[in-house]
């Protein structure tokens, strides 16, 4: 679940910004601006200043899949001879 999803759910349940912020250790401004006003769109990160990303989401996702695969276990280890 996205880190912002519980905030959106709490807003949808009618909790106040202050109650949500206190419970989740946030500022009322964060809850009000990003989630109460924007709803589900508030879950997306806002663009940040600085250098644009070099790699897109698809490429990053493929890398994460590649590197999360466990290598096969080998029964014997080989030592290189000098």
Image: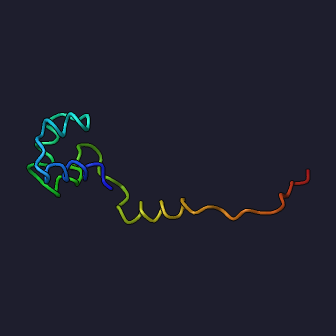
Measuring from the top left, give residue 3's x and y in whole percent.
30, 49
Against 57, residue 34 (above or below) is above
Question: Image point 81% across, 63% down: which residue?
Answer: 75
In-front residue for pair 59/42? 42
Against 18, residue 51 (above or below) is below
Question: Image point 14% across, 52% down: which residue?
Answer: 13
In-front residue for pair 79/3? 3
In the picture, measured across the screen, residue 78 lies left or right of residue 70, that is right
Measuring from the top left, give residue 14's x and y in whole percent.
10, 49
Against 22, residue 15 (above or below) is below
Image quarter of the N terminus: bottom left
Its colouring scheme is rainbow
In the picture, measured across the screen, residue 64 lies left or right of residue 79, that is left
In-front residue for pair 31/44? 31
Q: Residue furthest right?
A: 82
In the picture, measured across the screen, residue 78 lies left or right of residue 67, that is right
Measuring from the top left, give residue 43's x and y in whole percent.
22, 53
In-front residue for pair 15/65? 15
Question: Image point 16% across, 57% down: which residue?
Answer: 41
Determine which quarter of the picture holds residue 50.
top left
Measuring from the top left, give residue 82's x and y in whole percent.
91, 50
């Amino acid at each position: 679940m996205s880190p912002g999803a519980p905030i959106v759910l709490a807003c949808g349940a009618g909790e106040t910004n202050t109650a949500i912020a206190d419970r989740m250790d946030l500022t009322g401004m964060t809850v009000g601006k990003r989630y109460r006003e924007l709803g589900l769109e508030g879950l997306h990160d806002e663009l940040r200043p600085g250098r644009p990303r070099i790699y897109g989401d698809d490429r990053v996702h493929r890398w994460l899949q590649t590197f999360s695969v466990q290598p096969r276990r080998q029964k014997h280890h080989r030592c290189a001879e000098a």
